[in-house]
Image (cartoon, rainbow, N blue to C red):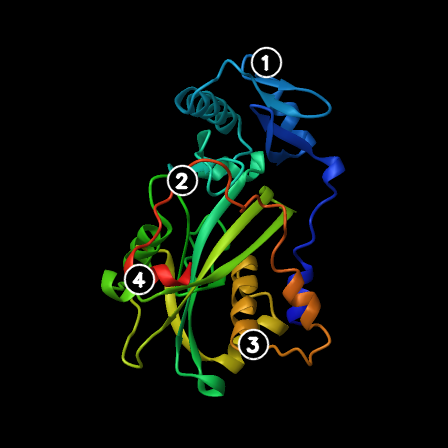
Amino acid sequence: MSLVDRIRLFRRPDLSTLRPFVIEGQRLGWILPAFAERLAKFPAVFEAGADAVRLKDRFDSYERRSEALAGVVDALAREGGLPKFRNERYPVAKSFYDKPLLGLERSAVPSFGTLAYGVHLNGYVGQGRDMKMWIGRRSRNKATGPLKLDHIVAGGQPIGLSLMENLIKECAEEAAMSADLARQSRPVGFTSYLIQNHEGIRNDVLFCYDIALAEDFTPVNTDGEIEEFYLWPIERVIEVLATTEEFKFNVAMVIIDFLVRHGFVAPEDPTYPEIVLNMRIRDHFLARSEGPSPYPLPQGEGARFL
């Protein structure tokens, strides 16, 4: 395996084999045929046809849509076949910048193939070939990717928090990082992908942040999600990425993006164009739509990075 092989794992499925998930005439997700058949058992909620699964128009508000989906997800969970509930709702909208049409239980998001977002922080020490990166080992009890290698901090983006508020929260929980230190994180872009895996359809956008840490900083996990941390030379990070599958799949993509931005993957490498071009896909509706954003923009020092 190589770095480009890691990126090649993010091949999108054949969309013609999936059913669009439609709300108010908008495609907001992708559903596997087997799950569409399960949803057809709820005719009061969905119109589940061969061409699409549509939420009925009578659910005409955020609250009604959220309640309807929650009832279906609860019923399906009792039947089995859905992951353990996280008791955390993710926004369902066509764009990150649109007002959500409903809130969906996090564990059910891949089943409906709706857009999901996360914040991922690359924590590093030093510069150039002397650089080191903080790497976490995920808890053996994690619902996804147990014992896989991870960032110093990463987390899903729930309803009700701005990106920076969420990052500060995750920094405190996962690395005992103060809010003042967390605010030194720089937004540096995003990675995105649309893939099919054992969960369903992962339709994700990961907002990436970098933070340069002092030599004497040591992360301490406080929420039980990380078993231990390692401070690895960047060459070891590259070697493990390129020769093993130890890293959680999407963490690998974010770190490869970091390696490109910091010059560890150079244009002279013949795989460089393929790596760079395939860390983002164009149809994740990131362009701002009409109306005000539901997410507050950062003020002051951090605002210059937008």
Tag 3 residue:
238
Q: Mark 3 Cα within 10 Å, few/some/many (few <14, many 20+)?
A: some
Tag 2 residue:
86
Sequence-first tag of 1 and 3 = 1
Q: Is residue 110 left or right of residue 207?
A: right
Q: Amino acid at mark 2?
A: Arg
- Residue 12, visible in the rendered structure: yes
Q: Is residue 300 left or right of residue 155?
A: left
Q: Is residue 156 left or right of residue 281?
A: left
* Disc 1 from disc 3: Cα separation: 50 Å
Tag 4 residue:
221
Element on which disc 4 rests: loop
Sequence-first tag of 3 and 2 = 2
Tag 1 residue:
43
* Disc 4 from disc 2: Cα separation: 19 Å
Relative depth, front residue between 250 and 197 = 250
Residue 215 percent across, percent down from the top left:
31, 81
Sequence-first tag of 4 and 1 = 1
Quarter of the figure with residue 64: top left
Relative depth, front residue between 200 and 169 = 169
